[in-house]
Image (cartoon, grey):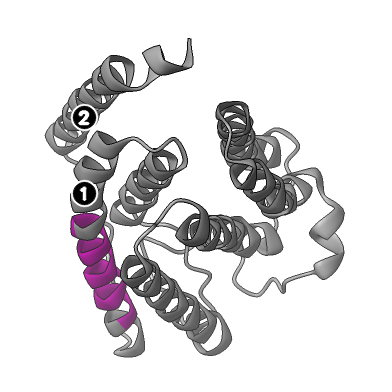
Amino acid sequence: MRRLNFPAADSMNRNDKIKFGDIFQVPNLLSISRILLTPVIGYFLWLGTNQGTLLAVIFMVIAGLTDYFDGVTARWLNKMTKLGLVLDPVADKIFIIVLIFELIFLRGFPAWLAAVIILRDAMILLGAFIMMRHYKIVPSSIISGKYYFASLTVLVLSYVIRFPFGIQMFLAVVIIMLILSSLEYAFLFYKTIQKTEIGRAPGRPIYGLLRTIIAVIMAAIYLYKLYEYFLPGYF
């Protein structure tokens, strides 16, 4: 079986098969719980009250914690499974897509953007399926994809709490990261089907530092505007 030095591939034995019995492992149960929280969040959004919005945000935070702890517990408990590698990103996509559908009806989330997001995720899942089925590679997240998902999460949060500045700010960021991450995924998929070795680019600390600085600055601006325009109305 061909082995690629593929930057988004897992380090597990590629001969391993997905075992659906692993669904009962703690990390995988955490991933599933993230999906199950979507109707709860939708219910509190449907209430249309400040208290309902606050509870929706709290459950979104809980969902975010499950996204963090499913990976952490997998490493702590030494329960890294191929099912978990697939289930974690799929749970993320289902969670955000269901939440976006709820926001279309309850918060005016743009339907055109929702369609683009769903199309992108469908193409990535199709590519991942082809890579697993025909090339025995289990892809995982790439750095641009992580930044895209993080920016999309903040945009969704901005719609949940009806924060106009956050919507304007992160709508642009989401579109930029969506394009960049889609192009990177397409490039990696193309190299895979061409049977081209893909080496991991050498780490450059300066790039990581710049990304961190930009993220901190954006977070500071967002939180300042959030406090200035939104939070006082709740207290």
Q: Is residue 90 magenta?
A: no
Residue 77 position, x and y percent, is 76, 37
Q: Magenta stretch mostly in which secondary structure?
A: helix
Task: Give, as a single range, the part of the protein colored magenta.
Answer: 176-189
* Secondary element at tag 2: helix
Image-based side of 124 in relation to 64, left or right: left
The reply to whether residue 196 is in sight is: no
The three-letter amino acid code for the residue at tag 2 is Met
* Secondary element at tag 1: helix
**Label pair 1/2, CB-CB below 8 angstroms:** yes
Most foreground residue, 3 or 149 = 149
Residue 21 position, x and y percent, is 87, 64
Q: Which residue is mark 1?
A: 173
**In the rendered image of this protein, does residue 185 appear above or below residue 102?**
below
The reply to whether residue 163 is in sight is: yes
Rounded to the nearest angstrom, the CA distance separating label 1 from label 2 is 10 Å
- Please report the residue visible at 69 percent of the width from the left and 71 percent of the height from the top: 16
Q: Which mark is residue 5?
A: none
Q: Which residue is mark 2?
A: 218
Q: Is residue 183 magenta?
A: yes
Label 2 crowd bin: few (<14), some (14–19), many (20+), radius 10 Å:
some
